[in-house]
């Protein structure tokens, strides 16, 4: 299926990794729909992409935590395109207090509040599941549906349990656990959709210089969308139910 015939919906795409993903897909000719909580910021992002030569960019006012926005996105996509080829569940939050670049690392398991846990899981997990379920009928209409769940290497239990792992000292419990749960959704949904053209994968974008990643991150923002773009454009014989960073498989 040619990229020019595809449409992608990317949540939280007015800045950061989401915008880079929109830029990457748009450069391939995919029609990109930006989901943005602040519609004016979404429109500004769309104008930036159009100025770069990306012609097919739309904007939907979208807050992942608002169920009515899920239905509004469905109605918009159904009415304008009649299908959805690519869903990139990019929107997310990190509410744990800590700094990834701190020498001793940090661990919030004994200090994180129920409020932070609930708010983190609502955005990073529950709302993602709900949105995906809402949009799945449109994805089923695509001849090559792709669902990309923006996870993190911090969702890897195997790496968190390994004292020699580079993330061993970086344990933001609410955020990490929400991404572990998101990985479980990836595995379960991929198995349910086996035998269909739809592929479901988790993406670790890398530690990127964003509002969330901070200035100490080793990867530039321009690199942040590459894994999501790769998984959004997998060929028919590509993987499903996997956990990847720039083509490399990560341990669960």
Image: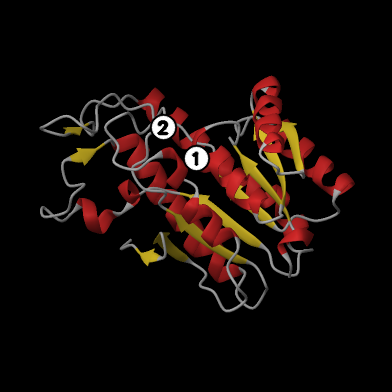
Image position of 169 with respect to 198: above or below: above
Q: Position of residue 145 (x, y in %)?
A: 68, 64
Q: Secondary structure at mark 1?
A: helix
Question: Which numbered marker is on residue 210?
Answer: 2
Q: Quadrant of residue 36?
A: top right
Q: Position of residue 68 (x, y in %)?
A: 74, 31
Image position of 229 with respect to 115: above or below: below
Which residue is depicted at the point 54% across and 70% down? 191
Q: Position of residue 107 (x, y in %)?
A: 19, 34
| 66 displayed left or right of 178 | right
Q: Earlier in the sequence, mark 2 or mark 1?
A: 1
Q: Position of residue 132 (x, y in %)?
A: 64, 50
Residue that carries the numbered disc 1 in the rendered image: 17
Q: Quadrant of residue 208?
A: top left
Determine if residue 67 is in view: no
Image position of 121 with respect to 201: above or below: above
Is disc 1 surrounded by few (<14), some (14 to 19) or many (20+) residues within 10 Å? many
Which residue is depicted at the point 70% across and 68% down? 144
| 241 displayed left or right of 175 | right
Is disc 2 surrounded by few (<14), some (14 to 19) or many (20+) residues within 10 Å? some
Quadrant of the image for the C terminus?
bottom left
Q: Quadrant of residue 19?
A: top right
Q: Secondary structure at mark 2?
A: loop
Pointer 2 and pointer 1: residues touching (CB < 8 Å)?
Answer: yes
Which residue is depicted at the point 42% across and 65% down? 247
- Along the line of sight, the residue nearer the viewer: 81 or 119: 81
Which residue is depicted at the point 58% across and 50% down? 24
Quadrant of the image for the N terminus?
bottom right
| 147 displayed left or right of 30 | left
Determine if residue 60 is in view: yes
């Amino acid at each position: 299926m040619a990229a020019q015939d595809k449409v992608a919906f990317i949540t939280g795409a007015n800045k950061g990794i989401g915008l880079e993903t929109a830029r990457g897909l748009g450069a391939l000719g995919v029609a990109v729909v930006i989901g943005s909580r602040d519609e004016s910021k979404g429109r500004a992002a769309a104008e930036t992409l159009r100025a770069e030569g990306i012609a097919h960019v739309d904007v939907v006012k979208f807050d992942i935590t608002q169920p009515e926005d899920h239905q509004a996105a469905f109605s918009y996509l159904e009415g304008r395109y009649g299908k959805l080829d690519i869903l990139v569940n990019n929107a997310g939050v990190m509410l744990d207090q800590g700094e990834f670049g701190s020498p001793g690392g940090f661990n919030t398991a004994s200090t994180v509040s129920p409020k932070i846990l609930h708010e983190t899981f609502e955005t990073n997990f529950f709302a993602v599941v709900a949105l995906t379920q809402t949009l799945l009928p449109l994805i089923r209409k695509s001849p090559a549906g792709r669902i990309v769940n923006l996870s993190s290497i911090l969702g890897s239990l195997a790496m968190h349990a390994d004292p020699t792992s580079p993330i061993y000292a970086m344990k933001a419990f609410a955020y990490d656990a929400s991404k572990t749960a998101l990985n479980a959704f990836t595995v379960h949904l991929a198995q349910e959709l086996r035998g269909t053209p739809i592929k479901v994968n988790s993406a670790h974008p890398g530690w990127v210089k964003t509002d969330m990643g901070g200035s100490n991150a080793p990867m530039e923002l321009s690199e942040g969308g590459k894994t999501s773009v790769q998984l959004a454009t997998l060929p028919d014989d590509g993987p499903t139910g996997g956990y990847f960073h720039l083509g490399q498989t990560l341990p669960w």
